[in-house]
């Protein structure tokens, strides 16, 4: 993958290096740079109801003393972006929305539309992130394999999140029904597939972002299990 | 599993013992106790349109002379309930709703959140019941595996029922989108996964209960196949 | 399968023989009979918004010089129709709607509700058609296996199309939630499962027909992949 560094919203503080190497146990006190992203100027005007930011509670990991925000990683799945031929406009939007909702953006990167490579990377990231959000590769094109890679690594699927994202997207354009995105759980990490267009990605994420803090808490086993 | 006996709505008549042993062929004239449940006081106020009870037609099995109501079994999937640490408030609600809709409640029980054990029990029950409804174990928690156990045993899935249940639940709370419940067919038995909360279970079941008599008739092959 | 010939809307021009034998490369200039179907009298009054016909652009295949409309094949999955015991009222409706939307109807046929046979035929047709639409076999009856046969042959699923079809169908009757239809991609061909009733089939198809030209273009890789 191509780690994003320097440019754009990620320039101020989000540490991109620690995601893959640091395991879940090594995360105590490692919330560097989370807040900065939230203050970056929002590039798209995201319509929606009252923002979810206040609903987010920082989450304390079982072994940690310090309270940490949940960690999210953003992958832009795009041959063109991965090859440097195309500007990534969706990844930054997604990262900003997640940061505004209280997530620490652990990193952001590009990957080409290759099923095995994407699946391998999702599995790596799931070992240390609470949330991995992909954008791109969910359509009907011959190279669109993000849902398949996601299913390859998920132990359990969460179909309702994908249903909700398509339903919300369809309010803007019926083309949203063509998105094949899935959502599921790999270990204790939630993986969401968003469409590739900036608008489609933002609308889809907006439709479920208010549910993500609770989802992450459930995945960590922090909510009482009945 | 832990067969429920004595307490609550099931105290008056529902025979819990016959489900696993009696095969489909042995069911003639075995509708003991169905009506009693319908008369038990309803514990939750279930909002909804005109009740489905009148829509239900008793179904005659192929080999039987007597007309029998369809047989339903209710499983509360919950570590806490199975261990006796927690009161089951959802199972009784589900059983009462099904009884009011014309189903004979063949039995009700608790099971812990264990995939293999639940799958084994679902397969057993599917041999004699027309409908098995689970409540619980559909969330994102590490122990929530009811959908996986259900998929393990289903020959054919019925995704529309799960879509409809989430959609209806979301009218009350967006958290309904986090339910991972599935619906499917094991042999000639329909299996539905409801969420674990009493309110979520009731809302989800209410959204599809009017379809269940027709569904059961189709599964029995009683509706003309084109 | 039983190739449909002579009767009904297909009597004027749609060549039924070329579908299975002609491969994708052999399709240049082979759009015989497409327009005729569009002029056949519509048998059902299909309510809906402004027709999608004008939105359809003829598609040029990579190797071809001539501009060709996308090719669709319609399969009525029904024991009764395949045995000649029952009139097929859905297949003609589906074919007429597709023709009116700009598709060339490459052929139409009956198949009994047999999973392996249907899967084999879907795979054959997918080698030369852009779209295969089935009607029937999506219910809960013991013989309803169209979704399973479709999943058997699809490389990638498109769940949003099935979600949208059920949602639209449910506006007319809640029984639409019982349809187990799926949609997916086999090679470069989109496969859609519609319900068996003429009304259900028409409503389901109407709900997504405006998306199909874009879907076909994506499958052919004619839309820029990001």
Image: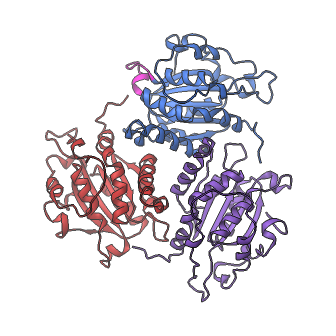
Chain colours: A red, B blue, C purple
Q: In which quarter of the image is the N terminus of chain C?
A: bottom right
Question: Measuring 58% from the left and 35% from the top, which residue is drawn there?
Answer: B191
User: In the drawing, does residue C11 fall left or right of residue A52?
Assistant: right
Residue at the image position 45 percent from the left and 52 percent from the top: A167
Residue projecting furthest to the bottom:
C65
Q: Looking at this view, is C200 or B25 the one in front?
A: C200
Left or right of A73: which side holds C80? right
- Measured as percent of width and height from the top left, residue A5 is found at 19, 68
Q: Is A56 placed above or below C217 here?
A: above
* Viewer-nearest residue: B120 or C34: C34
| Rendered location of residue B35, percent (x, y) | 64, 15
Confirm whether the magenta stretch covers residue B161.
no
Q: Is residue A222 visible?
A: yes
Q: Give the range drawn in magenta.
A: B78-89
As drawn, A100 above or below B16: below
Q: Which of B41 and A72 is in front in this view?
A: B41
> At 55% across and 20% down in the image, what residue appears?
B96
Query: Quick check: can you spot residue C121?
Result: no
Residue C224 falls in image quadrant: bottom left
Residue in the image at 64% along x and 82% along y: C25
Residue C66: % across, % down: 62, 87
**Above or below for A209 versus C40:** above
User: What count of labels does the image hold?
Assistant: 0
Is residue B95 rendered to the left or right of residue B127?
Answer: left
Q: Residue A51 appears at what percent x and percent y?
A: 25, 48
| Residue B81 falls within the magenta-colored stretch | yes
Main secondary structure along the magenta-highlighted residues: loop
Quarter in which the C terminus of chain C is drawn: bottom left
């Amino acid at each position: 993958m191509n780690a994003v560094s320097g440019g754009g919203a990620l320039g101020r503080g989000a540490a991109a290096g620690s995601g893959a190497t640091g395991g879940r146990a090594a995360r105590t006190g490692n919330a560097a740079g989370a807040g900065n992203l939230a203050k970056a100027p929002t590039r798209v005007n995201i319509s929606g109801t009252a923002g979810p930011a206040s609903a987010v509670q920082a989450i304390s990991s079982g072994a940690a003393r310090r309270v940490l925000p949940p960690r999210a990683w953003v992958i832009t799945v795009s041959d063109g972006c991965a090859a440097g031929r195309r500007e990534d406009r969706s990844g930054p939007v997604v990262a900003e929305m997640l940061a505004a909702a209280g997530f620490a953006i652990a990193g952001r990167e590009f990957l080409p539309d290759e099923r095995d490579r994407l699946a391998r990377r999702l599995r790596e990231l799931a070992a240390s992130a609470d949330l991995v959000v992909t954008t791109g590769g969910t359509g009907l094109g011959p190279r669109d394999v993000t849902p398949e890679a996601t299913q390859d690594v998920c132990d359990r699927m969460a179909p309702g999140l994908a249903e909700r994202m398509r339903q919300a997207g369809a309010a803007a354009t019926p083309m949203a029904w063509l998105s094949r995105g899935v959502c599921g759980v790999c270990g204790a990490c939630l993986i969401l597939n968003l469409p590739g267009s900036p608008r489609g990605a933002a609308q889809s994420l907006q439709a479920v972002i208010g549910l993500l803090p609770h989802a992450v808490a459930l995945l960590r086993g922090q909510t009482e299990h009945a």
